[in-house]
């Protein structure tokens, strides 16, 4: 989707990884900021990596001046797990619907969550840092899951859509 009207009729939205600075410029160029905020108030929305940065309420040490959408009460530090060459895969335990699921995920220039608001649930952590968080409709992950075949998190999000 690219334009505000493209949100019409959607049941949910995934905001993928990429480059949050560029995505933010395009969000404002296409006047998507308020439509996305309104959409997230009524529909499930899931942000991965750059998507998580855009969903946050605050970006630490924000030299790139990213203005996040404030969809979930977390602070993030961009590229805090290292640059592209330091990308890594990790086995994580996700707590979803009361069960614990092991999945292999990829961290690629990933954001670190540096603060979690009191109403935000932490569904997975890496070395004591939250990496998967949720509040109501909004789900946000520091990592990518689309690079392996494990669909457990996608299925969790699909269940949120059906609920
Ligand atoms: N480093 C990117 C950013 O700050 C996010 C990386 C990713 O989405 N894999 O926008």
Image: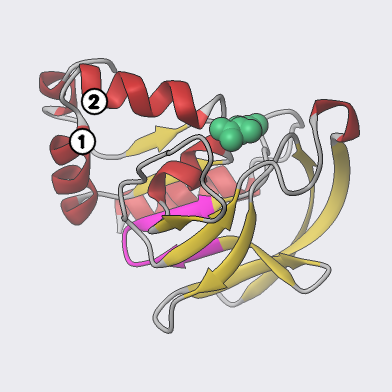
One can see residue 109 in this view:
yes
Would you call the spot at circle 2 few (<14 residues within 10 Å), some (14-19), or many (20 or more)?
few
In the picture of the structure, the residue carrying the numbered disc 2 is 28
| Residue 113 vertical placement versus 162 (above, below) | below
Q: Majority secondary structure of the magenta segment?
A: strand
Q: Which element type, helix, strand or loop, lies under badge 1?
A: helix
Which of the image's four quarters has the N terminus? Answer: top left
Vertical relation: 99 (above or below) 134: below
Residue 39 lies, in percent from the top left, at 18, 43
Q: Residue at x 34, y 36 (%)?
A: 13
Q: Is residue 9 left or right of residue 119?
A: left
Name the quadrant where ligand 1 sits. top right
**What whole-number distance in Å separates the C-alpha atoms at marks 1 and 2?**
6 Å
Mark 2 or mark 1, which is nearer the start of the sequence? Answer: 2
Q: Is mark 2 within 8 Å of ligand 1?
A: no
Q: Which residues are magenta?
A: 133-140
The reply to whether discs 1 and 2 touch (Cβ–Cβ < 8 Å) is yes
Q: Where is residue 105, by image quadrant?
A: top right
Q: Residue at x 53, y 36 (%)?
A: 50
Residue labelled 1 has its Cβ within 8 Å of some atom of ligand 1: no
Q: Dot 1 surroundings within 10 Å: few (below 14), some, or many (20 or more)?
A: some
Q: Which residue is mark 1?
A: 33
Q: Is residue 36 above or below residue 98?
A: above
């Amino acid at each position: 989707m690219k334009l505000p009207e493209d949100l019409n009729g959607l049941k949910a939205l995934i905001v993928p990884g990429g480059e949050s600075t560029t995505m933010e410029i395009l969000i404002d160029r296409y006047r998507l900021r308020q439509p996305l905020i309104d959409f997230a108030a009524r529909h499930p929305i899931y942000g991965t990596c750059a998507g998580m940065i855009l969903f946050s309420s605050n970006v630490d040490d924000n030299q790139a001046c990213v203005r996040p959408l404030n969809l979930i009460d977390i602070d993030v530090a961009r590229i805090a797990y290292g640059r592209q060459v330091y990308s890594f895969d990790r086995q994580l335990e996700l707590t979803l619907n009361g069960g614990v699921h092991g999945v292999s995920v990829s961290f690629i220039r990933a954001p670190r969550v540096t603060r979690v608001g009191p109403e935000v649930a932490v569904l997975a952590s890496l070395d004591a840092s939250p990496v998967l968080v949720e509040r109501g409709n909004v789900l946000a992950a520091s990592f990518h899951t689309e690079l392996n075949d494990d669909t457990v998190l996608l299925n969790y999000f699909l269940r949120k859509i059906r609920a």
